[in-house]
Amino acid sequence: MINDVTIGIPLYRAEKFIKDCLNSALSQSYPNIDYLVIDDACDDNSVEIVSQMQREHPRGANIRLIRHTQNVGIGETRNHLITETKTKYLFFLDADDIITENAIQLLHEAAEKYQTDLVYGSHEQIDMTIEGHPVSPTIYKQQKFLQPDEYPTYVYRKYEGIQAPIWNALINMEWFRSTGLRFLPINYWEDFALTMDLATYTSRVVLLSDVTYYYYRHTGSLSNAKDLTGFRKDLIKNNISAIDHVKRNSDRIKHKSYFPGRMVKVMMTDFYIVCNILKNKDKIQPSFSKRELRDIMKSPLSFWETISLKNRKPENLFLYMLGVLPPSLSVGIITILGKHKGLI
């Protein structure tokens, strides 16, 4: 039978993790899988480990290794994975994570049964930065969304919505390519804009309560906005630029009933970033001015657009005001709220 799933792994400085990662992928109960590893000009032994597994593992012949001559970053490497995928489905797997043995089997069964755009499995985060390595599970209620706008309405119903990253999803590539979406060419939060917009193109999505993915949070990870300790200003501004991209890409769905909820989710992401900057202000160099912090909160909507929203109006109006008040007042309000919420 022809392989119809690709497990795509972007590879960079992962020599400590790639063997376990690739072993979990190669141990899948589902048999019809291509393994695509793209080396983003690694300067450690990651590629040698992959090459050894190509030679020695029973499924090693199904591993395709593509090498970049120079480092282009995680965003462009993920885009290259999209371009090189030749199968019906693509599953992104980060090189420092692992998946359960039946992950692809479970996702594939749901995808074929419901002819989906996306199938998400549940996942667990293992925090390797804290002694004891606490586990934080994200377990979805098993459910399906098979009508247009049904899934994004669910996603944007509250700030937490659904914590569905680009990994741990089985993606129908014919549908995905029709959206024209791509990752931003940056190294941090390169997937934020894509995942925020992805939901707005979907018609058929399934969530599984089964844990299929283990996400490891390592020291020095730049993927979590709640951990800005020691971050440089330019790295934080990359995160902010990803959110700004989402703000600019909003006109297409302004008429949708879920749009006000999406705006709350986007603007609250800005709010949490500002809170984290304030929390770590003595460790971030160079520092952010109050005007810069206020400007992070600028809404893409005008005042009249904001008060014309048909739902979530009070929340959106308050968040709008944080972006137009005098900088000292805006930052003062954010500080008070951040302390009340335990964020600062």
Image (spheres, grey):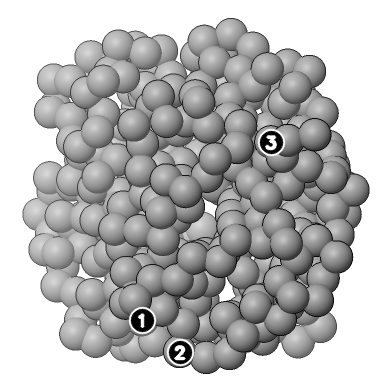
Question: Which of disc 2 and disc 1 is earlier in sequence?
Answer: 2
Quadrant of the snapshot with the C terminus: bottom left
> For mark 3, does the 10 Å Cα neighbourhood hold few (<14), some (14 to 19), or many (20 or more) residues?
some
Name above or below for residue 154 compared with residue 24: above
Q: Position of residue 206 (x, y in %)?
A: 70, 26
Q: Position of residue 153 (x, y in %)?
A: 52, 20
Q: Secondary structure at mark 2?
A: loop
Kindly indicate the quadrant of the structure image that contains residue 9. Answer: bottom right
Name above or below for residue 113 compared with residue 24: above
Q: Can you identify the residue that label 3 sits on?
A: 4
- Closer mark to the observer between disc 1 and disc 2: 2
Q: Can you identify the residue that label 2 sits on?
A: 43
Q: Residue at x 58, y 25 (%)?
A: 117
Kindly indicate the quadrant of the structure image that contains residue 41. Answer: bottom left
Q: Residue at x 66, y 61 (%)?
A: 63
Compute the Cα span from label 2 to label 3: 32 Å
Compute the Cα span from label 1 to label 2: 23 Å
What amino acid does circle 1 point to? Phe
Q: Secondary structure at mark 1?
A: loop
Question: Which of disc 3 and disc 2 is earlier in sequence?
Answer: 3
Left or right of 264? Residue 237 is: left
Name above or below for residue 202 compared with residue 63: above
Q: Secondary structure at mark 3?
A: loop
Q: Can you identify the residue that label 1 sits on?
A: 231
